[in-house]
Amino acid sequence: MSVCPSCGKENPPDAEFCQYCNQPLETPGKPPRLLSQIQGLIPAEPVITSGRLRDSDSQLAAGLAVSSGVVSEKGGRSEPETAVAITGAVVDDITEGQVEGAEEPAFKPTPPPPSPTVVSAPAPTGGRNALAIIASIFIGVILFGSIGNLLAPATPSVSTSVKNAYTFIEILSSSSRVLLAWDYDPATQAELELLAQPILQHLQQKQVNTVFMSLRPFGPSVAADAYNLSSRLGAANNMVVASPNPVEFGFIPGETAALRSLTLSPVMASNQPVLSAQASGIRPTETIDAFDLIIEFSSDFASSQQWAEQVSVRTKKPLIVAASGAVAPALLPYEQTGQIRVLLSGYPDALAYESLIGQRGPAYQQASAQTLALLAFLGVLFFAAFRSLFSSSKH
Amino acid sequence: MVSYLGVFLTSVLTLAIFSRAVRPNRAFRWTSHLLLGLGAGYTAAVVLKQVVLASFSPRELMHPLQFSLILISTFLSLLLALRFSTDARIRAWGLLPLGMMTGVGGALALAGALRGSFLPQLMATSHLEFTERFPVLNVLSIVLATLTSLGVLLYLLPGLDELDAVGKETREKEWMVWFLYGWRLWGYWALMLALGALLASTAGARLTLLVGRVQYLLGVWF
């Protein structure tokens, strides 16, 4: 536990700020995290009671004791017991199996080199600098990629999933009804809105009736954002946007129970059945089959799983899931079973769908930045792997 | 003017979150606290507006079926509020709606898991055809990967040290040792491939989010 110097309350050992008064817990004399972890491994009692210490090991251990702050706290001079405990344990750890002989019981630690200037531990900047450098690299390549968009492909490759999703929407008529479920939060909006945009644009082109709902409280908000952006993009691209206004069923709490109710009567599952029935033209006695297509935009596995488990087993109407790339692999089994008829995920599918509807939208604008960021990620990954290999081969 | 202020505030807050990459700082902490607080407040407001107050709108109350449903749900809500009572006998009445909620939810989830996940995926496994020539091999590889990774994950298999010890002790059981070695190896490879695929797709998704945010800031300021 670390004690806050400001309010004196105890905090978890790895806390960097006080949980009570928000003051920083790191003081200039506090040892860096790595050395704290090393100290944590050191037992209180000396482990080595016999054995001969080599000079190089003793100097290393003594230096470690100095730099870890234990020695400096004693005024620059090491207390014999402490030094024996620390150096003994460190040598046990470092020179495991290399301690020579077992004859001499006496263990004389080498005193630390006189270094009056060593007062406090060095600032723990190594890991943070690396993180800042990596973050700068990513932001730099994204900024560079955003200029000119030179790497944007003229004709992106279109997967079968995207083609299928396009076909499902293309065969709809103006009298069709589509249920759109917005199951993501503002935190993942930047990714999922890329997928939602071209689909919404396509639905608007077809002048389909849309009803939207959400299993999450933030759903109506992100849906409104997506509809607004879609209308703006449609107007900017001179597309026909005179599609019917979407009907809002809103946030429906209850997850599993809500979806089961939705399959029995979508109107009754909404929070305002009378209003929903009037606006959507769906009777309370109609089931989920009142919709011709169901599309879910999802950022987490659980909600898509609920849709597959509770809804698609009770209807023949196709379910398209446009999911975050992070959860798409986990949803593949449901696509294999046919419960999710089409699974769209991530930036590539958004770019492909944009190309199918003949629009250069937000995904196209990000093409160069995405490519460069991915290359930077691979570069960092390979650099780390090579560095790890190189350092392990040295040892 | 208000929209400019909003844009400015959003940009500053985004930069405050990004500043965590350089070092933990107070701006990051205050912003993350603000985000959490706003999230909780927004959720409460949405529930109040879209769930509670929406149900009590005059148009809904005039419909007899909806009115009876609201009556039942209000009664159950009041029963739930009895959980705050200090009297144990009164508090017990609050278990009724609680039990109903968890019971219905649990039953639906269990039925959904069986009917919507377990059975369809079991059936789908028997129809897997990744290669047209050897569909049986595909099914076998999936079954093998499932069993071996389960063996590793559930710690059913002995550790490598134990296997080494057994191998040295008895010559008769050597085939069993090799079998267990192979099991462990397959299990680890299956897990590594699965987790590697998940990591790769997660990294791609997070990069998309980063690009979106940075380009948003660019669009705002330039």
Image (cartoon, rainbow, N blue to C red):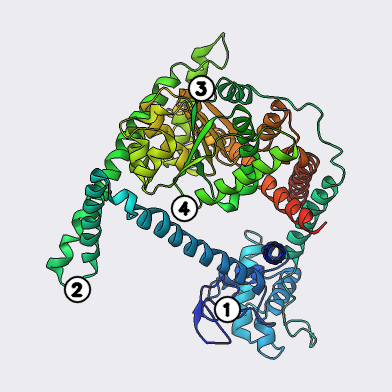
Q: Give the Cα separation between the discs numbered 3 and 4.
A: 42 Å
Q: Nearer the viewer, residue A67 or A62?
A: A67
Which quadrant of the rendered structure holds the C terminus of chain B? bottom right
Q: Which residue is mark 4?
A: A217
The amino acid type found where label 4 is placed reads Pro
The amino acid type found where label 3 is placed reads Ser
**Closer to the N terminus: mark 4 or mark 1?**
1
Tell me the residue at 58%/25% (across/down): A165
Q: Which residue is mark 2?
A: B86
Same chain for the residues at labels 4 and 2, yes or no?
A: no
- Mark 3 element type: helix
- Mark 1 element type: loop
Q: Is residue A242 placed above or below A223 in the rendered structure?
A: above
Q: Which residue is mark 1?
A: A22
Q: Chain of mark 2?
A: B
Q: Which residue is mark 3?
A: B141
Q: Chain of mark 4?
A: A
Asked if the residue under mark 2 is in contact with the one under mark 3, i.e. CB atoms within 8 Å, the reply is no
- x%, y% of residue A164? 59, 22
